[in-house]
Amino acid sequence: SLEWIPGTGTRGSADISSTILGKSVKIEIKINKDRQSEAQKDYQKAIEKAGGIYYIAKDFQTFFDWYMKTFKNGGKL
């Protein structure tokens, strides 16, 4: 069986936290009818206010297309 265990990190933090070409990139994965919590929305605002990128991935192909478009040309944003 599966059991969700709450994390001990920052409330609302993204599923994937990365640095791509020196830029902070946070990726939240939402499948089917899953939606952002208020804590996740607040976290997204904080990341974007600090100059980071926050992306909500709903499926792999859309994520891949976004990634290739965002980081094409040697990563010039």
Image (cartoon, rainbow, N blue to C red):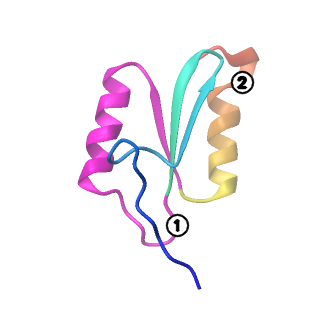
Question: Which residue is found at the position 60% from the left and 15% from the top?
Answer: 22
Q: Amino acid at mark 1?
A: Ile
The image shows residue 27 at horizontal and vertical percentages of: 53, 43
Q: Amino acid at mark 2?
A: Lys
Mark 2 burial class by Cα count in 10 Å: few <14, some 14-19, many 20+: few
Reading the image, the residue beneath label 2 is 72
Q: Nearer the viewer, residue 49 or 61?
A: 49
Reading the image, the residue beneath label 1 is 31
Nearest to the eye among marks 2 and 1: give it.
1
**Horizontal side of residue 37 vs 53, given as left or right:** left
The image shows residue 10 at horizontal and vertical percentages of: 36, 41
Which span of residues is magenta-colored? Answer: 30-57
Residue 60 belongs to magenta span: no
In the picture, residue 54 is in which quadrant?
A: top left
Question: Which residue is found at the position 71% from the left and 34% from the top?
Answer: 68
Q: Residue furthest right?
A: 74
Quadrant of the drawing holding the C terminus:
top right
Of the numbered discs 2 and 1, the one sitting upstream in the chain is 1
In the picture, residue 76 is in which quadrant?
A: top right
Classify 52 as above or below 4. Answer: above
**Tag 2 secondary structure:** helix
Q: How many numbered marks appear?
A: 2
* Disc assigned to residue 49: none
Residue 39 belongs to magenta span: yes
